[in-house]
Amino acid sequence: MTTETKQEKTVVLDQDGHLANREDWSEELAQELANLEEVGELTDRHWQVIRYIQKEFDEKGDSP
């Protein structure tokens, strides 16, 4: 599955809606995806969770 971004970039998502290529990730893209899912503006707490998951993935090669 793919999605178009406001930055006129196409990103590939897996069947669960997760990024297929971590290199495509950016804070702007995270906010765009949150908007698409009707989450709204990402809060400080959202960013804490996002950064924790990224750290775990970087260290272990898998999400928590």
Image (spheres, rainbow, N blue to C red):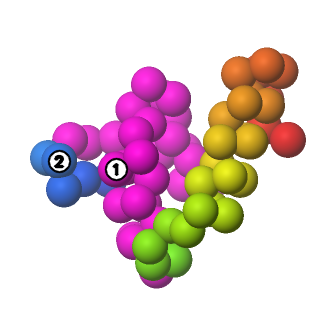
Range drawn in magenta? 9-38
- In the image, farthest residue toward the left: 8
Q: Which mark is residue 7?
A: 2
| Residue kind at label 1, given as amino acid type | Glu
Say whether residue 5 is left or right of residue 25.
left
- In the image, farthest residue toward the front: 44
Q: Are marks 1 and 2 in contact (CB under 8 Å)?
A: yes
What residue lies at 54% left-to-right and 54% top-to-bottom? 17
Q: Is residue 13 visible?
A: yes
Residue 33 drawn at (x, y percent): 42, 60
Which residue position is annotated with label 1?
A: 28
Q: Nearer the viewer, residue 62 or 1?
A: 62
Residue 63 drawn at (x, y percent): 78, 37
- The quadrant in which the C terminus is found is top right
42 up-or-down from 28: above or below: below
Say whether residue 9 is left or right of residue 22.
left
* Residue 31 within the segment the image draws in magenta: yes
Name the quadrant containing residue 40. bottom left
- Could you classify mark 1 by the number of other residues whose Cα lies within 10 Å: few (under 14), some (14-19), or many (20 or more)? few
Marks 1 and 2, Cα distance to the nearest angstrom?
9 Å
| Residue kind at label 2, given as amino acid type | Gln
Residue 5 drawn at (x, y percent): 24, 53
Q: Secondary structure at mark 2?
A: loop
